Amino acid sequence: MLPDRSRSGSILIGNEAVVGVARKQKSVLPGFGLTLGLTLTWLTLLILIPLAGLFIKTSELSFGQFIATVTSPRTLHALGISFGLSFAAALVNLVAGVLVVWALVRYRFPGHRLFDAIVDIPFALPTAVAGVALSALFSQNGWLGAPLAALGIKVAFTPLGIFVAMIFIGIPFVVRTVQPVLADLEVELEEAATSLGADRWQIVTRVILPSLLPAILTGFALAFARAVGEYGSVIFIAGNLPNVSEIAPLLIVIRLSEFRYADATAIAVVMLVVAFIIIFIINRIQRWAQLHGTARPA
């Protein structure tokens, strides 16, 4: 029997269809199983097992002891200082970082490369060195601290000093996250919006910002996460007074030095859960922005 040809181009032999061109099977990328296995192994060893140990150690406390530990006035104040100032510093970095990115990407000026490199200094500078430098700079006889002290503003060894240190270590995350997105943004979008009669404010709010919003939220989340866990640069300028300028990471170290390991892990668990919830919410907002924040001419 001679084979029949269907309209789709396949060869019919009896009741079987043999595709003329070799059929490609749907499969994952080559090496997916190996890379997935390595990824899960490293995540388990480096993240999941240490986090599991954290919860296991905390389970040594009864529920009442856990509540008493995490709701003590000193702990609540330390948590409030860490999360409240971290969130405020991330907001400041969000605004300041976008302005820095705009200047670095859209303008060319003398010292452009130098200023672009300065942004990365908090990345490379040891946190302890940053803390010492900020403490000397904002002390009452420092270059910036003395003029501020004359105005009645004390920065070093106060919560305001913590706030300044968190801004210092967080701004590179916003700048380096938003900068490549703005650099790749097509200028034709702005030109099209201008040709349709949009003014500069409409172009910024309805064309540029929607395109930058996912990157801005990512930078905000990174700056917030870094500030929450920051220790080295903060303890030198904080003053570390209980119920005044004591951060949660420092309180954890104090509990460890007192051999109260379960209390320390209990505070760490609260920080972990709260930070995860906040970052999860930010990621959901970022996902929504990616789906609905497409740039379009005004």
Image (cartoon, rainbow, N blue to C red):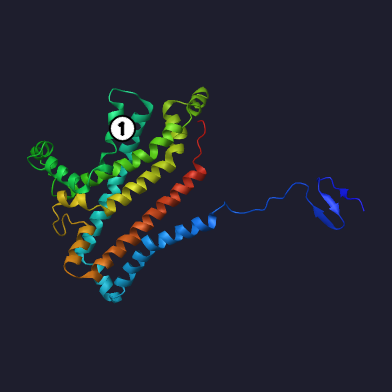
The image position of residue 77, as x and y in percent, is 21, 59
- Note whether 297 is above or below 288 in the view shown: above
Foreground of the two, 32 or 262: 32
Residue corresponding to mark 1: 116
Q: Quadrant of residue 40?
A: bottom left
Q: Quadrant of residue 267?
A: bottom left
Report the front residue among 16 and 102.
16
Give left or right: position of 23 versus 181. right
Position of residue 4 in the picture relative to residue 105 (left or right)? right
> Residue shown at 37%/29% (left/top)?
105
Residue furthest right in the image: 1
| Residue drawn where x is 36% and y is 39% of the image | 176
Q: Horizontal and vertical percent for residue 208?
A: 44, 33
Position of 116 with respect to 1 (left or right) is left
Q: Position of residue 35 (x, y in %)?
A: 49, 55
Q: In the rendered picture of this protein, how many numbered marks are placed on residues?
A: 1
Residue 102, by quadrant, is top left
Residue 201 is left or right of residue 168, and the answer is: right
Q: Is residue 209 above or below residue 229?
A: above
Q: Residue at x 83, y 49 (%)?
A: 11
Q: Could you tell me which secondary element the residue under label 1 belongs to?
A: helix
Viewer-nearest residue: 245 or 215 = 215
Mark 1 residue type: Asp
Q: Nearer the viewer, residue 23 or 226?
A: 23
Q: Residues within 10 Å of mark 1 (few under 14, many from 20)?
A: some
Q: Position of residue 50 (x, y in %)?
A: 34, 64
